[in-house]
Image: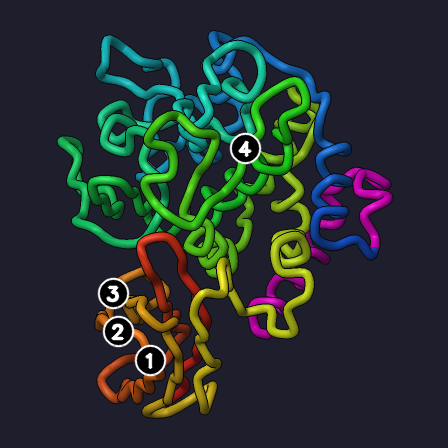
Amino acid sequence: MRYILVLLFLCSLLSAQIPEGYYDGTEGLTGEELKEALHNIIKDHVCFSYASLWDILKDTDRDPDNPDNVILIYTGWSVDAAQEYNEGNGWNREHVWAVSHGNLGTGMGAGTDVHHIRPCDISVNSARGNKDFDNGGVEYIDPDGPTGCYTTTYTWEPRDEDKGDVARMIFYMVVRYEGVGGPDLEMVDYAPSAPNNEPFHGVFSTLYEWHLADPPDDREIYRNDVIYHNYQQNRNPFIDHPEFATLIWFPSSNNDDIVDISPIYYLSQNYPNPFNPSTTIDFRIKDGDSGFFEIFNLKGQLILLEEFKSGKHSINWDADGYPSGIYFYSLRSPSTRQTRKMILLK
């Protein structure tokens, strides 16, 4: 509920930035109907060449404290905007929806859509590669310094300040590109998601958590406005209306904190919630199956990991040594995950 209140507050802040009538026709819609309505609003935007993105990104991602610089995704570093590529020593154009996930290419269209392309340090961009987004791994230390990002063989976890941005860019791509005259992009809840260049990107449940935990900030709102007014003439709906994500992907849920991708398992709400100092979580794993139970803090750091076989289980988590705040608990297998939120108040 706390997240929903935050999202509603953000909506009131953003309303002055949204062109009047832009989202007409979406009122009361949920699920696929809302997704289709948003697709029809944001499609048919003005497209630009791949080469033109250098100059566009110098505008959309300009450092407000130094107009000659751009701010890089994944690190937040401010660098000289004129050092585009610079023989491999400057910055380049990062496709947040990896180009290989659906063979987007760099022709005018999905591969040049500014809503998911950001300036990035070249070696950091190379380290991310075409990995899916998820929590975990080892910290990536770039030759230029620590990044705050974590990586595994198949996944990339951006620094906390970029997590919501990444999620909303992926959401945008799924709604914008529905297969009519272009790729049909979809999110999945596993990684690797596209070993044979399938048009998939993951990990959805993690992206949804990041979207809730890191709402749109001033820079993201500014960027959305610049792309709309100066270039593509379309907007990212999930920046303007963060609640659209819940209305599309969880329209029938009575609890807006639930992330339930594939109900192979039963995972209860913890009780009590909020709690101090302990709480109980019940879950059942399908006969013949197995799964991992995990607890993460808001930074995505793994606090607890246990493997369970089929049957009914109960976890009593004593959080006496942990600070107040929001925590996520998950039940996952290699192909599915259910995630819920709990609040520790001391």
| Residue depicted at x 43% and y 29% | 198
Residues shaded magenta? 1-27
Against 235, is 29 above or below? Answer: below
> CB atoms at circles 2 and 1 under 8 Å apart?
yes
**Residue type at mark 2?**
Lys
Q: How many marks?
A: 4
Label 3 environment density (alpha carbons within 10 Å; few <14, some 14–19, many ≥20):
some
Q: CA distance from mark 2 to mark 1?
A: 7 Å
Q: CA distance from mark 4 to mark 3?
A: 30 Å
* Residue occupied by mark 4: 185
**Of residues 314 and 343, which is closer to you in this image?**
314
> Split into 4 quadrants, where in the image is the N terminus?
bottom right
**Residue type at mark 3?**
Leu
For residue 320, the mark is none
**Nearest to viewer (mark 1 / mark 3):** 1
**Of residues 288 and 175, which is closer to you in this image?**
288
Q: Earlier in the sequence, mark 1 or mark 4?
A: 4
**Residue type at mark 1?**
Gly
- Disc 1 secondary structure class: strand
* Residue occupied by mark 1: 311
**Residue type at mark 4?**
Leu
- Disc 2 secondary structure class: strand
Q: Earlier in the sequence, mark 1 or mark 3?
A: 3
